[in-house]
Amino acid sequence: MNHRGSGILLHITSLPSPYGIGDFGPSAIRFADFLRDAGQRYWQILPLNPINPSQGSSPYTNMSAMGINTMLISPEKLVEDGLLPPDAIHEPNFPADHVEYRDVITYKRKLYRASWEHFKQLHEKEHWEYNRFCDENSHWLDDYALFVTLKEHHEGSSWDQWPRELRDRQHEAMETHREMLADDINHIKFLQYIAATQWQQVKQYCNQLGIHVFGDLPIYVDYDSVDVWAHPEIFKLNDEKKPRKVAGVPPDYFSETGQRWGNPVYNWDELRHQKYRWWLMRMKWNLQLFDLVRIDHFRGLVAYWEIPAEEETAVHGKWVHAPVYDFLDTLGKRFFNLPVVAEDLGTITSDVREVMNHYRLPAMKVLHFAFGDDNPGHPYLPHNYENNCVVYTGTHDNNTTRGWFEHETSHEMRNRLENYTGRGVDVKAVHWDMIRLAMASVADMAIIPMQDILGLGQECRMNTPSTSEGNWRWRMRWEQLNDEITGHLRHLTRVFGR
């Protein structure tokens, strides 16, 4: 971040589309045009990694640190690019305001199989870009395609439940299955090629408009992921390749037992021995996908809460330090002017602040959290910001601003908000009042969730932490957006020099 700017948080799944889920097609281009018309410099999205409907379809729980969620492939683009006959698609009767993930997956998998069969019939010259993509990304794509195919072959079971020779990646068994399942493996590679190609077209279009794409990188991967299967040595596993230690956060004001996330924690000694090869590969890929990246749960790179795997809660965990300076120095040597934002929400200790200050990593500020205490020194109140930060009205884990004001603020909190803005605040305009506070602040970047731009209520929030139902489903509709909203956002952006 080297200049003052603002942008909008809207995940790809939330875009309008006739195919049940937002995708990399015409709506993504139209949304980029809206960002330009409204004077915005940034489009922030959530992780693009493959999702798992059995785990709530969260973009933060995934089976690959590198792969792309192929449900985001645009059927219209497949037709436009000659990868699917026009008569192969029709507009199904999907809801316009939310995603039904299982129905979308069923529908799109049929289209993708048809596209693959069509692609195989094309002239060899049409395969050149696909083959180049496979060659350039073989260091992760070969394992990923085999992993996904083996999971389907074993009816979705976790890799540790596969026959031992596959669980342990014995050479003969791996080669036998690569040959036996070659067509399915190549189909998975094809879908990754299409997803990456379509996304790069969206990103390039944004960049041509002067819009930077702001991505998100979850710090951990799932146990049932290709990364743990293919690189077990960089995680703390036992001889049976089960986690010895898992990740979480300690007990705090919000939970007496803490949070046991269950992700395997990294073996930082082995990562350092390997000169962080896996992390370098991961960061290189993410910086191809995005212009800048938020690292979720950044404090876990400094010290992480390690819980014995047999424990059912996080109570008996302990803090373990990671070689954060050596790690970030290594990243900095490989990637000039590392474009990273640190997610530092929650209880952050002085050692994390020291690391962030040392590397000049932008922090996050959330206005929803600023008015809970009668404290003029609260770090989330705009007059206490430094330039090197990103301010949000709320994040994907927060209620919408209207929902927050209606359902989560006390009489005292509303009084503090009114005292701070110097005017009366009502439910119909509170989202613009909060947007104005963010825009007017000295923060280098202000990011506003699209739900707040539209003034939507709590029924449109993206995620409610610690719940497993109804999350990650919200979608916008074009009729919710109009010239008045675009004009007002553009006006605020100009007034506050963003």
Image (tube, grey):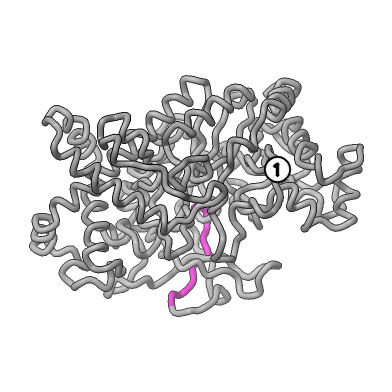
Q: Nearer the viewer, residue 209 or 287?
A: 209
Secondary structure beneath disc 1? loop
* For residue 366, above or below residue 487: below
* Quadrant, the N terminus: top right
Judged by its main secondary structure, the magenta piece is: strand
Residue found at x 87% / y 38%: 421
Which span is picked out in magenta? 301-309
* Quadrant, the C terminus: top right
* For residue 2, above or below residue 112: above
Q: Residue 454 lies in magenta, yes or no?
A: no
Instruction: Specify whether 295 is left or right of 459.
Output: left
Check disc 1: other Cα within 10 Å, few if <14, some if 14-19, many if 20+.
Answer: many
Q: Position of residue 340 (x, y in %)?
A: 51, 38
Q: Is residue 384 visible?
A: no
Q: Nearer the viewer, residue 337 or 198?
A: 198
Q: Residue flagged by tag 1: what amino acid is it? A: Thr
Q: Position of residue 184 (x, y in %)?
A: 18, 53
* For residue 441, above or below residue 487: below
Q: Please tell me in which quadrant of the rendered image residue 434 appears.
A: top right
Q: Position of residue 115 (x, y in %)?
A: 24, 42
Q: Is residue 112 visible?
A: yes
Instruction: Specify whether 401 is left or right of 103.
Output: right
Residue found at x 46% / y 48%: 20
Give the total number of marks visible in the rendering: 1
Q: Residue 306 lies in magenta, yes or no?
A: yes
Residue found at x 41% / y 53%: 104
Q: Position of residue 222 (x, y in %)?
A: 40, 61
Residue under numbered circle 1: 393
Instruction: Specify whether 459 is left or right of 149.
Output: right
Q: Please tell me in which quadrant of the rendered image residue 25 appears.
A: top left
